[in-house]
Image (tube, rainbow, N blue to C red):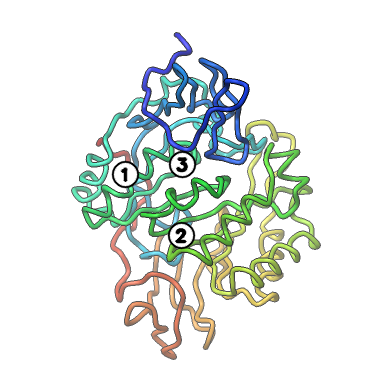
Amino acid sequence: MSDRATTAFPARYWQQADDGRIRCELCPRFCHLREGQRGFCYVRQNLDGRLVLTTYGRSSGFCADPIEKKPLNHFYPGTSVLSFGTAGCNLGCKFCQNWDISKSRSMDRLADSATPTAIAEAAVKRGCRSVAFTYNDPVIFAEYAIDTALACREKGVKTVVVSAGYITQKARADFFRYVDAANIDLKAFTNHFYEKICFGALEPVLETLLYLKQETQVWFELTTLLIPGQNDGDAELHQLCEWVAANLGNEVPLHFTAFHPDFRMTELGRTPPETLLRARRIARDKGLHYVYVGNVHNSEASSTYCPHCGEMVIERNWFHLGRYKIHDGGLCGYCGGAVAGWFTNTKGNWQGWRERVHV
């Protein structure tokens, strides 16, 4: 198969470099590409002296998921979300849990095709409250994601970004302009981890988080996958939680999730549940109101509690919701105190697991 793009959608965020190459300005890698070359992400290519996106309108598949699977616990709980991704990634995480998609170098994985309008219409037809750009990082298919978010907004469908937040200041505003919610993967809190394990840098991710907090109305939550011996030490967890509390506030939900051996880090064991609970205690001690554990079964540590009276207001058993005591779009049903997030007075009726959807 030729290395020339099978799809050549005009990309944004690039300029001609002084040496004749193209300089991609979408992510902090700033890849310099000669004719025919692809960037680190593999899906952006210099074709005939211009940058193109080779995956526009092409997906690795569409599924209806519970919104809690993103994970988003404070964004219309119990509703379904139409999820899709493409191929490639702009980070090189050795522990990638979706490596068969994000590390793919085969466009043959992109079996489904759909325009932004078709995706929005499919969400409406399927009864999905939102559409999520996920599975691989949507930053690298920014043009497709932006157009789809706009199409969804015109149909009254919310949009969700699941991303590592590795994006430049130049592209950041466009990328999040029509987005309603995001889960940002804060992979660790040391630049050493980002450099050695992810082949990236921490600072651009922190800049994205500050941008979301200070410049947008996007509802966002954080996820940190705790890897034994890599990013789960007390000192690092204290620093991470202190930074979140000081810079993002105590109402941003934080998810600590369990690692399982995969991709190029199969020599490590799974994250012990005790590690997740220790991280949760640290975060709560730092004043964070909403701290969750994931990839393990622990209903108590996965449920939402009112920060004012301490009562359980949303009960979770994996992705199934039990008790739901949220009134008036975000008030505790016991004491009337505010619970941060986007809520309706009744939980969504999606209690299922993943279902394949054809668009």
The residue at the point 44 percent across, 83 percent down is: 338
- Dot 1 lies on which element? helix
- In the rendered image, which residue does mark 3 sit on? 138
- Give the quarter of the figure containing the C terminus: top left
Comes first in the chain, label 2 or label 3? 2
- The image shows residue 265, relative to residue 203, as above or below, that is above
Q: Earlier in the sequence, mark 2 or mark 1?
A: 2
Q: Nearer the viewer, residue 332 or 324?
A: 332
Residue 148 numbered tag:
1
The residue identified by callout 2 is 72
Task: Name which of mark 1 and mark 3 comes first in the sequence.
Answer: 3
The label on residue 284 is none
Residue placed furthest toward the top: 1
Residue 94, image x, y percentages:
67, 35
Q: Which quarter of the figure is the N terminus placed in? A: top left
Give the percent coordinates (x, y) of residue 202.
68, 49
In this view, the residue in front, 337 or 334, is 337
Relative to the observer, which residue lies in front, 139 or 83?
139
Q: Nearer the viewer, mark 2 or mark 3?
A: 3
Q: CA distance from mark 1 to mark 3?
A: 11 Å
Q: Is residue 214 above or below residue 65?
A: below
Locate residue 124, reporting x and y percent: 21, 51
Quarter of the image for residue 313 reads: bottom left
